[in-house]
Amino acid sequence: MFGIGMPELIVILIIALIVFGPKNLPNIGRALGRGLREFKKATQELKQEIKIEEPEEERKENMNEK
């Protein structure tokens, strides 16, 4: 996972706990989860668009060659 081991992850969580406090961590976690979900959705949509446009470009190139 991004080259982060368990000890590094524990240190990051402890620092987040100190900086944000125990009451804010669940809200921050939810917001982070939503952001990651939206990012994954956007990348999947972009991949699908590229796959759809690629065959159209190949067809146009083939028509131009004839």
Image (spheres, rainbow, N blue to C red):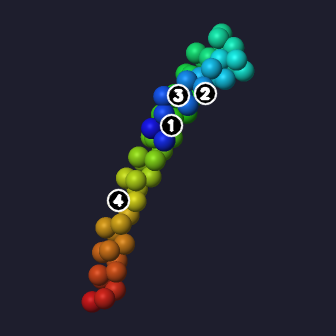
Relative to 10, is 64 above or below? below
Q: Which mark is residue 7?
A: 3
Q: CA distance from mark 2 to mark 1?
A: 10 Å
Of the residues under marks 1 and 4, which one precedes in the sequence?
1
Circle 3 packing at 10 Å, graded few (<14), some (14-19), many (20+), is few
Q: Secondary structure at mark 1?
A: loop
The image position of residue 4, as x and y in percent, is 51, 37
Q: How many marks?
A: 4
The quadrant where residue 60 appears: bottom left
The image position of residue 30, as x and y in percent, is 55, 22
Q: On the picture, is 65 further left or further right than 23?
A: left
Q: Which mark is residue 4?
A: 1
Q: CA distance from mark 3 to mark 1?
A: 8 Å
Q: Residue at 65% of width from left, 17% of height from top?
A: 17
Q: Secondary structure at mark 4?
A: helix
Q: On the picture, is 14 further left or further right than 9?
A: right
Q: Secondary structure at mark 3?
A: helix
Dot 2 and dot 1 residues touching (CB under 8 Å): yes
- Read off the residue under disc 2: 12
Q: Say which amino acid is labelled 3.
A: Pro
Q: Say which amino acid is labelled 2.
A: Ile
Dot 3 and dot 1 residues touching (CB under 8 Å): no
Dot 1 and dot 4 residues touching (CB under 8 Å): no
Q: Which mark is residue 51?
A: 4
Relative to 20, is 42 above or below? below
Residue 38 visible in rendering: no
The image position of residue 43, as x and y in percent, is 46, 47
Q: In front here: 10 or 25? A: 10
Quadrant position of the N terminus in the picture: top left
Circle 4 packing at 10 Å, graded few (<14), some (14-19), many (20+), is few
Dot 2 and dot 3 residues touching (CB under 8 Å): no
